[in-house]
Image (tube, rainbow, N blue to C red):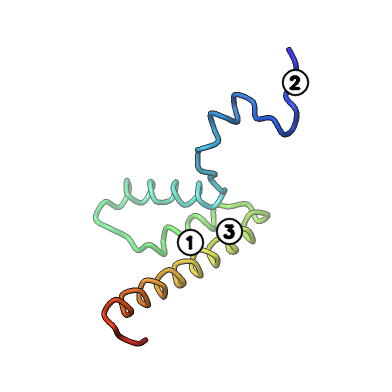
């Protein structure tokens, strides 16, 4: 059996290439959301998910989680601006 070169994907790479990459913060977020859905089916604030997820992370992961949150907020803000500009342009309005 020959070993693949670093530039040649093996079978594992081909199978997993399309799967999303899950960050530690995303995993903690999903776990916190699941726990809150189970324990508080009547509802909770989304901020609670974030606080629980961030608190559960080891300290070495928290800076990356904050970077992820900041980037996600920035991306959502940009997407909102782009959407508003597109709708305004379609209606002939100026922002």
**2 with respect to 71 (left or right):** right
Q: Residues within 10 Å of mark 2 (few under 14, many from 20)?
A: few
Disc 3: which residue: 65
Q: Nearer the viewer, mark 3 or mark 1?
A: 3
Disc nearer the start of the sequence (3/1): 1
Q: Residues within 10 Å of mark 1 (few under 14, many from 20)?
A: few
Task: Name the residue: 54% across, 44% down.
Answer: 21
Position in image of residue 77 (x %, y %): 45, 72
User: Quick check: 6 above or below 87?
Assistant: above
User: Quick check: 47 above or below 9?
Assistant: below
Position in image of residue 8 (x %, y %): 69, 30
Q: Secondary structure at mark 2?
A: loop
Measured in 3D between alpha carbons, the distance from the residue under mark 3 to the one under mark 1, in whole angstroms, is 11 Å
Disc 2: which residue: 3
Position in image of residue 80 (x %, y %): 39, 72
Which quadrant: the C terminus? bottom left
Give 71 or 24, whichever is nearer the viewer: 71
Task: Name the residue: 50% across, 63% down.
Answer: 72
Which quadrant: the N terminus? top right
Disc 1: which residue: 51
Q: Residues within 10 Å of mark 3 (few under 14, many from 20)?
A: some
């Amino acid at each position: 059996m020959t070993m693949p070169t670093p530039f040649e994907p093996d079978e594992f790479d081909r199978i997993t290439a399309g799967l999303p990459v899950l960050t530690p913060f995303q995993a903690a977020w999903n776990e916190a959301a699941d726990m809150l859905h189970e324990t508080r089916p009547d509802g909770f604030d989304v901020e609670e998910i974030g606080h629980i997820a961030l608190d559960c992370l080891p300290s070495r992961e928290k800076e990356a989680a904050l970077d992820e949150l900041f980037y996600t907020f920035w991306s959502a803000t940009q997407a909102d601006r782009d959407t508003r500009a597109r709708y305004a342009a379609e209606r002939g309005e100026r922002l």
